[in-house]
Amino acid sequence: MKYTEKDIGNIVDYSDDKGSYYEERIVMVYCSICGSRFIGPIREAGGFLGGHDLFHAWEYKTETETHMEA
């Protein structure tokens, strides 16, 4: 399902291959490092933020290690 800014604040029920979710609020969140945005159910927004946090931590670590070797 594709969500837009018009859907923010709506409460939805949905199912996927992991289970069924009830009374999930549609939210918009963004990554404070790169500005990427996500609109969708709160549960998925948490995964988006967590994924970005881990990616940017890895990215920072990789950059730091590369500069330290030089």
Image (cartoon, helix red, strand yellow):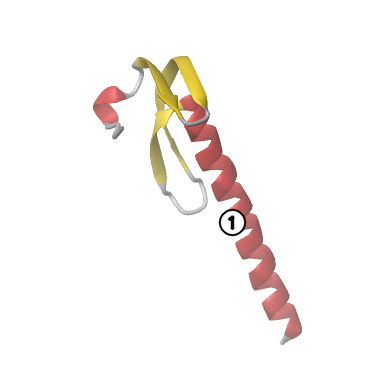
Q: Which residue is at 33% across, 24% downward?
A: 8
- As drawn, 29 above or below 62: above
Q: Residue furthest bottom?
A: 70
- As drawn, 64 above or below 42: below
Kindly identify the amino acid type of the residue bearing the numbered disc 1: His
Q: How dense is the environment of label 1, judged by Cα within 10 Å: few (below 14), some, or many (20 and up)?
A: some
**Can you say which quadrant of the picture contains the N terminus?**
top left
> Where residue 57 sits: x, y (%)?
65, 56
Residue 7 sits in quarter: top left
Q: Which residue is at 59% across, 55% downward?
A: 55
Instruction: List the residue tagged with mark 1.
Output: 56
> Where residue 41 sits: x, y (%)?
43, 26
Left or right: where does residue 62 sit relative to residue 69?
A: left
Q: Residue furthest right?
A: 69
> Where residue 52 sits: x, y (%)?
54, 49
Residue 13 sits in quarter: top left
Left or right: where does residue 14 sit relative to residue 5?
A: right
Q: Nearer the viewer, residue 10 or 33?
A: 10
Residue 28 sits in quarter: top left
Q: Nearer the viewer, residue 13 or 25?
A: 13
Q: Which residue is at 51% across, 27% downward?
A: 43
> Where residue 4 sits: x, y (%)?
27, 32
Q: What is the secondary structure assignment of the residue under circle 1?
A: helix
**Can you say which quadrant of the picture contains the C terminus?**
bottom right
